[in-house]
């Protein structure tokens, strides 16, 4: 800041000179004192210079509407929206989220540093604060087959990047608690910044070792008891409420029942589709749901603002107070969190939930044409089983991305698994180097009938994942994704019924949200009509079935993996 600007803003704060812009007659949510104060908010450019009684060159009467700080999403993946990152921001900012802390490990797993650079460049001019965490585990596990391996040496150039806040979710917790040197080098590189966690179901002493390493957040808590265990070790809990994983009710209910201090809790979405954001809101939905569960509106707003700002060292964000950036949300009430207007750096970027303006960058060719598959046949999908003998089955759970391991006899004929409506076949097909590696397993709780669906969005390595009740439709769906260079596909009767091309790394589309959403909604409806569990999103739920760092049972290109015992129950490649 230049001295002249400092002196001028000081005069404004003292009331000796009119502010540039004043929001009059507001009911200000003070996240520091926990009060609601009737006051004016004086702005100079992008900065709040005072909260009290002020006059300005331009004044606007808010007629006692509530004003709170812009909301912060403390952990998300832009790729999960299926469209350009800037388009997600434009839609979510309409619901008051003015700060995003993104982990681009999906892009990095496919295209490495080119993918990370795309996320940074596309959000550079967004009407919001967009920060990035450097992906820590690319790939997520040593045995995974992905498109890029990211080492500490390659990360070093980003350690001082002004928009990179630290190290992204450390999901390879085993390398942390066993003190592996390669992981230590990554942690040490970002020691001066934030180290994000990803640690579902660690034992007590493992949590101690994990936090000893300097990792201080986690968004993988599915219940309050585990969140409390991590909180006792000093971790900040990022309460997740996304499209597939919905953990807010369980954790907030525990906070309310115990009357627990909320300083150590924030909100995040992790993975949330734009269609759902438009229907119910973004972080605003987290606040509304928390309030409905008995949390006070001010506590919920603190969790959505200042708590996250403190957690990530964002000194000028998260409060309506002098010296803070003028990211403001005008609310009609605190119970429904009805967003009336959103300010970013002192200017209006959205009213009445209308998406903000945005200009996605042209997608570079270096992150297209990423789907390379070896020929797939019925033999590739064969799964030998013994009749009457228990087999490891992946059991899906409604509203969760964790699965259960079931040991059950499965239908078979001639020594091979025969899928049906209860026991679907699932396969993960390597798609980065055309190795021909295919993992095959049994999926329960998905329940597709007379068809198959396939996706190149398959966390975190993003090989092609496909589930169905017959091989012919599974093959047809996979072949369609090779044709479109990634996306979603549905097949039945040996032919493709519908597909959504995602040619940008096989993860996103640059065709625009309206086009993508119209196709996606029709495909989701079609998938449910084919018998898929109505309590799950068919594509998002399927996309997590290959992630071998979340309990209990997963399928990779290498075979069926038991996360708890850290071993393959059936190794196929």
Image (cartoon, grey):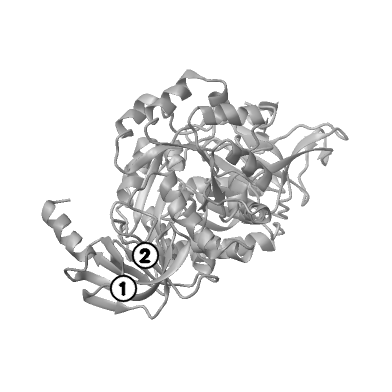
- Which label sits on residue 344? none
**Is residue 508 shown to the viewer in this render?**
no
**Is residue 369 shown to the viewer in this render?**
yes
Please tell me which residue is depicted at 40% across the width and 25% down the height of the picture.
188
Which is more toward the observer, 196 or 384? 196
Residue 542 position in % (x across, y down): 62, 48
> Hey, which quadrant is residue 533 in on the image?
bottom right
Is mark 1 in CB contact (under 8 Å) with mark 2?
yes
Which is more toward the observer, 372 or 208? 208
> Hey, which quadrant is residue 48 in on the image?
bottom left
Give the structural element (helix, strand or loop) at label 1. Answer: strand
Q: Which of marks 1 and 2 is in front?
A: 1
Specify the farthest residue to the right: 388
Please tell me which residue is depicted at 45% across the width and 33% down the height of the picture.
136
Which is more toward the observer, 375 or 304? 304
Check disc 2 and report the residue beneath it: 328
> Hey, which quadrant is residue 163 in on the image?
top left
Residue 178 position in % (x across, y down): 57, 20
Q: Earlier in the sequence, mark 1 or mark 2?
A: 1
**Above/below status of 362 relative to 171:** below
Check disc 1 and report the residue beneath it: 23
Q: Quadrant of the C terminus?
A: top right
Specify the farthest residue to the left: 4
Q: How far apart are marks 1 and 2 (CA)?
A: 11 Å
Give the structural element (helix, strand or loop) at label 2. Answer: strand
- Classify mark 2: residues with Cα within 10 Å, few (<14), some (14-19) or many (20+): many
**Above/below status of 525 relative to 423:** below
Q: Is residue 155 left or right of residue 532?
A: left
Residue 447 position in % (x across, y down): 73, 53
């Amino acid at each position: 800041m230049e001295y002249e600007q400092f002196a001028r803003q000081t005069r404004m704060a003292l009331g000796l000179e009119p502010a540039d812009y004043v929001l009059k007659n507001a009911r200000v949510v003070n996240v520091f004192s926990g009060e609601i104060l009737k006051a004016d908010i004086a702005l100079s450019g992008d900065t709040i210079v005072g909260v009290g009684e002020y006059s300005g060159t331009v004044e606007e009467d808010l007629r006692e509407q509530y004003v709170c700080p812009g909301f912060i999403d403390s952990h998300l993946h832009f790729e999960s929206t299926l469209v350009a990152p800037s388009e997600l921001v434009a839609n979510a900012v309409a619901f008051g989220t003015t700060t995003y802390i993104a982990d681009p490990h999906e892009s990095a797993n496919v295209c490495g540093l080119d993918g990370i650079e795309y996320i940074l460049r596309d959000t550079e001019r967004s009407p919001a604060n967009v920060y990035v965490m450097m992906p820590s585990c690319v790939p997520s596990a040593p045995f995974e087959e992905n498109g890029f391996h990211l080492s500490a040496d390659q990360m070093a150039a980003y350690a001082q990047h002004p928009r990179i806040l630290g190290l992204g979710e450390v999901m390879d917790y085993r390398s942390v608690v066993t003190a592996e040197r390669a992981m230590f080098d990554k942690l040490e590189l970002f020691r001066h910044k934030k180290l994000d966690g990803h640690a579902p179901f660690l034992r007590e002493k493992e949590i101690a070792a994990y936090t000893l390493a300097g990792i201080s957040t986690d968004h993988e808590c599915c219940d309050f008891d585990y969140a409390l265990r991590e909180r006792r070790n000093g971790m900040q809990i990022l309460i997740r409420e996304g499209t597939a994983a919905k953990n807010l009710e369980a954790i907030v209910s525990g906070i309310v029942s115990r009357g627990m201090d909320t300083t150590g809790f924030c909100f995040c979405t992790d993975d949330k589709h734009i269609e759902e954001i438009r229907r119910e809101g973004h972080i605003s939905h987290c606040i509304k749901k928390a309030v409905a569960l008995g949390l006070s509106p001010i506590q919920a707003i603190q969790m959505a603002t200042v708590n996250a700002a403190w957690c990530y060292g964002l000194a000028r964000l998260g409060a309506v107070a002098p010296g803070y950036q003028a990211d403001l949300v005008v609310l009609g009430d605190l119970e429904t969190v009805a967003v009336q207007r959103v300010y970013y750096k002192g200017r209006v970027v959205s009213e009445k939930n209308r998406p903000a303006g945005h200009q996605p960058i042209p997608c570079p060719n270096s992150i297209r044409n990423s789907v390379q598959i070896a020929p797939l046949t019925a033999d590739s999908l064969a799964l030998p089983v013994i009749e009457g003998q228990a087999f490891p089955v992946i059991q899906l759970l409604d509203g969760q991305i964790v699965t259960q391991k079931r040991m059950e006899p499965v239908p078979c004929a001639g020594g091979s698994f025969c899928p049906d409506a209860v026991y679907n076949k699932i396969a993960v097909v390597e798609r980065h180097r055309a190795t021909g590696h295919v993992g095959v397993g049994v999926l329960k709780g998905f329940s597709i009938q007379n068809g198959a669906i396939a996706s190149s969005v398959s966390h975190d390595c993003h090989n092609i994942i496909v589930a169905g009740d017959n091989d012919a439709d599974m093959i047809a769906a996979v072949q369609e994704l090779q044709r479109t260079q990634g996306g979603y596909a549905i097949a039945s009767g040996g032919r493709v019924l519908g597909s959504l091309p995602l040619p940008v790394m096989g993860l996103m589309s640059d065709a625009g949200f309206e086009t993508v959403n119209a196709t996606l909604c029709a495909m989701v409806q079609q998938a449910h009509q084919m018998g898929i569990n109505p309590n799950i999103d068919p594509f998002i739920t399927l996309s997590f079935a290959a992630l071998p760092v979340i309990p209990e049972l997963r399928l990779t290109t290498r075979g069926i993996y038991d996360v708890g015992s850290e071993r393959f129950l059936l190794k196929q490649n």
